[in-house]
Amino acid sequence: MKIIARIRTDFPDKFGIPRQSGLVESLQGTIVFEPEYRNPEAVRGLEEFSHIWLLWKFSRSKKEHWSATVKPPRLGGKKRMGVFATRSPYRPNDIGLSCVRLTGLETDEKMGPVIHVTGADIMDRTPIYDIKPYIPFTDCHPEAREGYTSETIRHELEVDFPEELLLRYPEEKREAVRGILAQDPRPAYVHDPERIYGVTFADRNVRFKVTGNRLTVCDVTLIREDDVKR
C-alpha cells in the first residue's frame, strides 16, 4: 500500500499515548499529504463531515514474526487473547485504525490540503494509508456487544498538577496533558507508588508518580532549549 500522508502530533514516543482514539478529545493533530497526493480535489466535500477514519501504519512496532496470541495491557499483561480479538500493534499486517474529529481543512500554498483533527491516538510522523469519512448511520452500532474489553479497567486518575509546573506548558496544551495523565499511562501490571514515570508530550517531559487513584506531577522539563519560545 502507498503512504498518502503523515500526521503531526505531540507524541514522539508511544508511551503515554491514549489506548484508543477519542479518549482525550483535546489532543491536536495535523495531517500533511505526501507530494503525490497534494491535490485539493482529493478532499472535496470532506469538510462536511465531523469525524473521519484514519488507516495508518504501526511504524515503530518491531517484530520478526507474528504471534497468534497477545497479552492486552488492560488485562494485566498476563492473560492471552487472540491477536484478531485485540487492537495490538503486533499483527501480521501492521495497520492501525482511528476515528478522529475533523476540526479544520485548509489549503497551504506549498503543502496542499492540510487536515486538522483532534483525539488522535497516534505518534508523531506516523504514515497514513487512507482517510475515509465517518458515516453515523452505518458506522455507529449502539446495540453492539462488547467482548472481554468489558472486563478491562476503566478509570481516570485524579491528577495533582501543581500550577507552577502546569504553567511550563503553553495554555493550549494544558488540557491535553492533564487528559493524558488522567488516562493512567502506566502499564496495567505496574503499581509501584515509589516509582517515578516519565511521559514526553509537546516537547516536554512530565515526571510523575501514582499512589492509589491519585497521580502527582513531580517535574516538567523542556526536551530542547530551542523550544523555549514555542
Image: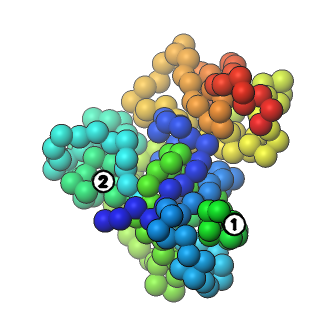
Quarter occupied by residue 44? bottom right
- Mark 2 nearby-residue class (10 Å; few <14, some 14–19, many ≥20): some
At horizontal 16% and vertical 44% (from top left) the residue drawn is: 65
Three-letter amino acid code of the residue under disc 1: Glu
At horizontal 28% and vertical 39% (from top left) the residue drawn is: 62
Quarter occupied by residue 161? top right
Label 2 element class: loop
Q: 64 or 127, which lies in front?
A: 127
At horizontal 72% and vertical 27% (from top left) the residue drawn is: 226
Quarter occupied by residue 211? top right
**Res 219 visible:** yes
Q: Distance between the Cα atoms at labels 2 and 1?
A: 33 Å
Q: 149 or 100, which lies in front?
A: 100
Judge whether 37 appears above or below 8 on screen.
below
Q: 106 or 143, which lies in front?
A: 106
Task: Report if the CB atoms under discs 2 and 1 are less than 8 Å apart.
Answer: no
Q: Which residue is labeled 2 in the image?
A: 94
- The answer to whether 228 appears left or right of 198 in the picture is right
Position in image of residue 190 (x %, y %): 43, 25
- Mark 1 nearby-residue class (10 Å; few <14, some 14–19, many ≥20): few
**Mark 2 or mark 1: whose residue is earlier in sequence:** 2
For residue 109, the mark is: 1
- The answer to whether 169 appears left or right of 81 in the picture is right
Judge whether 207 appears above or below 114 on screen.
above
Position in image of residue 95 (x %, y %): 34, 58
Position in image of residue 143 (x %, y %): 44, 77
The N terminus, quarter of image? bottom left
